[in-house]
Amino acid sequence: MRLIYFFVLMLLPLLAFSQEEAFYIQFTDEDIRDAFTKIEDKYNVLFSYKDEDLSKNRITIKREKRTLLEVLAAIKDVTYLNYKVLNNRYVIINQNSEKDVDFNALDKVVIRSYLTKGIKKNSDGSYNIQPVKLGILPGLTEPDVLESIQLLPGVLSPNETATSFFVRGGASDQNRLIWDGITIYHKGHLFGMISPLNPNVTSEIKFINKGAHARYGERLSSVIDVSSRTDISNETTAELGFNGISADALLDIPIIKDKLNIQASYRRSYMDVFETVTFNQLADKVFESTKIKDIENGNNDFLFSDYNVKLNYKPNKKNRLYASVISIENQLDYSVNDSENNTSYTDRLMTTNTGYGLGWSIDWSKKISQTTTAFFSDYKLNYNFITKENNEQTSDFEKRNTIYDSGISSELRINVSENSNVTFGYQYTLKDVAYAFLNTTNLVFVLDTEDNIVQTHSSFGSYDYSNLELIDVSVGLRASYFEELDAVRLEPRLQVFKSIVKNLKFQATVEIKNQIISEIDETILSDLSLENRVWRLADGSAFPIINSQQVSSGFIYNKQGFSIDVDAYFKKLKNITALSLGFLNPESNNFNIGKQRVFGVDAFVKKRFNGFTSWLSYSFNRSKSNFDNLNDDRDFTSKSNVTHAVSSAVSYKLNGFQLALGWKWQTGKPYTISQQDGDGLVFNEGINTGELPNYHRLDFSSTYSFKFSEQNKLKGKVGFSVRNIYNRKNLISREYTGNNSLNDPIKLIEKYALGITPNLMFRVYW
């Protein structure tokens, strides 16, 4: 806290700024959104608007010295857009001057371009990411949904995967991923290396790492709420594109003008036809330390695909409906023939996630609106290891994991006054989760089998008060009854956002959350060593409901393109579970129940100037775990702990060109130290007492957008990126397998990060 107070005092001399100050400013046939960004930098204000109100406005204003109000008046003259300035800080834009501006219906943005254009931070602490508007980010040629999130402070992926990332020290299964109201369980294409969601069909992403609204439950760390396109265009549009891994297509067709349209997208890898340098680099990382990498004469057939279909229907101004379908699939078929012994081995691994969603929004009046949604998500993982001798099957080890997740929810929102609103809602979900490990040769279960169902009834309410001159506060309560567990859990939520002095804001959150579904590590019979985590439900005894309590507080400073965001947090988790293998606990190979404490600080600094954007983020995390019967009941460093992490980048935009260069550095993950003796490896120093070497890499990206002709709407975009430019060999994992029986040796497995990995992208739009 002393450091925070000192930081505030150092900033006070910088806070003097008059909204009546005049600056030279001009625009020449410029997109109005880009113009708003420049005005924000010049005059230290923030714009709020609905995208449909701006449509395709472009503006030209000659160079003159103007105050903020004079600039806004000039824009109104050429665009006929209405504006309203609140508290000399927020500028609300809409189309109709006769229409009242509903400030509560718009995001209260505090930093519009967080890392880059298209990423906003709101006063409730959440982030909004719009891929279609997203500026360039280091290492990415396309706006990957989940990898973009990993550049935000407090989000780390030590294993370099798109999906298995830690948010503020929480495990990856504590992050909830939602697509059009459908909960997604798929871990990502190419075993987590690529997001399972097509970024080109994504309209908006809401990322919440603290202070989640009471409508959100189920997970402890974060919510990634993704929406596909909701606008109804009157023109048919299409996109085609490819990169070093896959190709995709997108089609948007109007059916009834201004009322009904259909959108469809399809993406598929082409590695089964042609292998690129990009794929080979990713495959080297994914299949490292597996038999696919170790055996040279194996045949590896791998592919992935996904598709989305959505209907948007707007029968009138008060009603809006949608129906959405998503399908994600990965297939691996690996075979080895041993001609000398006349034997063959086949590994077949398939993971799929299919989801269906329905939604209906209605405005009952100017002050009352309601949203009702329903969804069904079907996740399946099937792995078979088949052995044949003389062309006859001798064994078939099978691993299964299935999830049937369905639910319905309804939420009523009432605008009590200009400054306040209340929300009430009810949600029902049914989760049916099963896993099994069996050998079909002798029909005995090798490890375990389970099939549980939990029905959850949740009601929630929230009161939001927003007064820019006083305070923004949100108070919520979520109450859940888990029917099969006969358990009730209350989850209070509190968010506070307060202006201290001009340009300096205070932010704080308090929340309690509970989680009934989580992943367990399965490492006892994993011949392929891929997808070794399976989902399971809480049962109230061996697997209790996981609980989290979290508080956070910090400051945001924002002036003329210069932003500072500092936030400290503390989390307490209880009833987490861990599987103790025999070499860590000689008494048993059972699951153990424990607790975790996390303390951390996230800091972010950004500056925009003359077409350049530069930012620097730092995260500190100290996470300790304690489990019964593990590590002599002493605390040890959590496996999700990364003590220090630094990320920096600089980007530049000139007309259609964009360039970005970024560097990441972080301390290594913890691991358990072993020593070699006559009988093999022994463990005498406790759990996670070692730390891997520091990790760092340099990434580069560039894109160019262009028109094929001024006479038609055909546009194109090309991109090039390189990850790990200087080819740093980063050790990212040191783990152990074995000890499945008295005769099995314990093996050390080390895994390394991506080497230098180039990627190309080409896309056309019309």
Image (cartoon, rainbow, N blue to C red):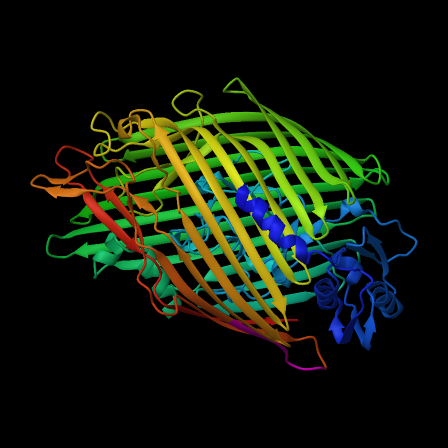
Q: Name the quadrant of the C terminus.
A: bottom right
Q: Residue 363: percent from the left, percent from the top?
A: 81, 41
Q: Is residue 229 visible?
A: no
Q: Name the quadrant of the N terminus.
A: top right
Mainly helix, strand or loop, the magenta region?
Answer: strand
Magenta segment boundaries in residue numbering: 702-710
Check if residue 485 falls in the magenta segment.
no
- Report the residue that reaches farthest toward the right: 98
Is 370 placed left or right of 594 in the picture? right
Is 158 placed left or right of 459 in the picture? left
Please name whichever residue, 59 or 504, is drawn nearer the observer in this view of the structure: 504
The answer to whether 579 is drawn above or below residue 658 in the figure is above
Please name whichever residue, 35 or 546, is drawn nearer the observer in this view of the structure: 35
Q: Residue 470: percent from the left, percent from the top?
A: 77, 41
Q: Residue 697: percent from the left, percent from the top?
A: 39, 63
Is 589 placed left or right of 696 in the picture? left
